[in-house]
Amino acid sequence: MPSAVIIVAVAGLAAFSISIVYNLCFHPLAKFPGPRLAAATHWYEAYFELVHKGGSQFAPKVRQLHAQYGPIIRINPDEISVNDGEFHDRLYAPQPAIRDRHPNFSSALGTSNGSFSSVDHFLHKRRRVAYSPFFSTANVMATEAMVHKKVNYCCDLLWESRDSSPNLRSHFAAISFDSFYTWAFGHSLDLLDDLPMAQKCSDTVELLVTSAPFYRIFPAIMGCARKVPHSILRLLSHHIGRVFDLHTLIYQAAEQFVQSQELHSSGKSEKVSPVEKQDTETLFSVICRSKAPESEKTASRISQEGTEMFMASFTPGRTMMLSMYYLHAYPHVLQSLRRELDEANPDPRKDISYETLNTLPYLKAVMKEIYRVTFPVGSRLPMTCHEDMEFGDWKIPAHSSISVNHRNLLFNSDIFPEPFEFRPERWLDVENPINEKRYFVAFGKGGRGCPGKEFATQVIQLTLCTLVQRFTFELGKTDFAKDIVPSRESILIAPAFASKGVKLKITGMRT
């Protein structure tokens, strides 16, 4: 037995040594600049993602490497990172450019069969075409009354509990998650009446996305977890158990929809509780009436699409919380914004329409700056190109993994002077206009850009504008470095572990 162990150990060491020699000397990317250790093994990246300063530190490390080695570097044996705005435009180009997602990044949300987790370009395209009518402008605009209703109810709750300094993060999470859930699945979770549940949803998604490096480096763990009964999973890992509780929530909605469709076809639809009557199409109804094959319309498949999108609705809630900090930390911005809102809507007790908000130039500038400074995605999202890509004198071979970090672009001082300053006026500078088409990448670009951009913008704007026009707030003690500046950069950024969040207290009602 000992000899067998020795043989296995020696064979493993030999294989590891051979892989290092191949990566350093014979790999198609062997000549690209960058640290030799990163080129030799994935454990270099793993150290910064899992160990250094508590993990999720590889994105900052890559920025340091770019400063040291230049705009194009090899950051692991199989991936090239490019820090350049023009190249970003080409890498994340729309159709007909063919871009596959890197397999290890596809399962970061615990899904394997949604559009986010689709590795193949053409499979992703087919799935996106199937659900794209759901995100049409008409379908989004039809949700406005529903969002207003939730925002007004939130305002009532905040005013009633103003003396106890309510946790706005829970309220924002409730509006964000519940607005999407109501729209996408046809009935409400009533999270504003269950703020602990809203906070649990938010915490679960944050735990998942900040732990994504672990599941990306060890993808088999999430794959095995899907095969374990949920009751056992909760005992083995409370963290993963909570993630799959969310999966179950969406699966139950999908299963109910599919059953109702089947019973409706047989004339027995009264036996299944119908979804609430609404003026919009649900995500499931749009997919199931598409030309996609029947295998794409099962409860299991469409629930994965729903799960990915429901988890993505975490970001508007987080954006709203950080927005309130920036607006109150820069009172001149808040004053100018309120002046513009008051002119457009003299009575703050009345709802202001999304159509009206879209005509306000200063609000547009404020929102663009908010999206820039609060950009939620921390890590790169590498693509695999089907053709050679050129950058300067370098030719990156086809089928190599290539990335450009969106966040680096939004904080590039050559494009955005004083990038860490919150300055909405930069978007109104007619003498030095920003090339928004190229550099405003807050919602991604190309065929894999955010499909829910318009809905997220509507929810954020209606909520923020209602709150700041209706109430006055006092910003409590907030540590900018600990509570606002991201200290962890995974799929989504996160503050320091010791952060206590943004503290705001309602001090009055505006009339």
Image (cartoon, rainbow, N blue to C red):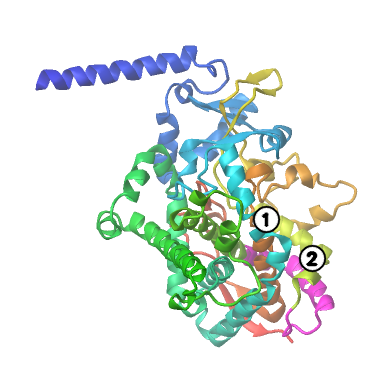
Density class for disc 1 (Cα within 10 Å; few <14, some 14-19, many ≥20) is many
For the C terminus, the quadrant is bottom right
Q: Say whether residue 65 is left or right of residue 258.
A: right
Q: What residue lies at 17% left-to-right and 19% top-to-bottom?
A: 6
Residue at disc 1, secondary structure: helix
Q: What residue lies at 40% left-to-right and 46% top-to-bottom?
A: 54
Which residue is label 2 attached to? 358
Q: Position of residue 372 (x, y in %)?
A: 68, 52
- Mark 2 belongs to which amino acid? Asn
Q: Residue furthest right?
A: 431
Q: Position of residue 236 (x, y in %)?
A: 25, 54
Q: What residue lies at 64% left-to-right and 63% top-to-bottom?
A: 323
Q: Is residue 130 visible?
A: yes
Q: Position of residue 162 (x, y in %)?
A: 55, 84
Nearer-the-camera pick, 297 or 379: 297
Residue at disc 2, secondary structure: loop
Density class for disc 2 (Cα within 10 Å; few <14, some 14-19, many ≥20) is few
Tell me which label, 2 or 1, sits earlier in the chain. 2
Q: Is residue 411 visible?
A: no
Q: From which residue to which does the magenta span run?
A: 323-351
Res 44 quadrant in image: top left
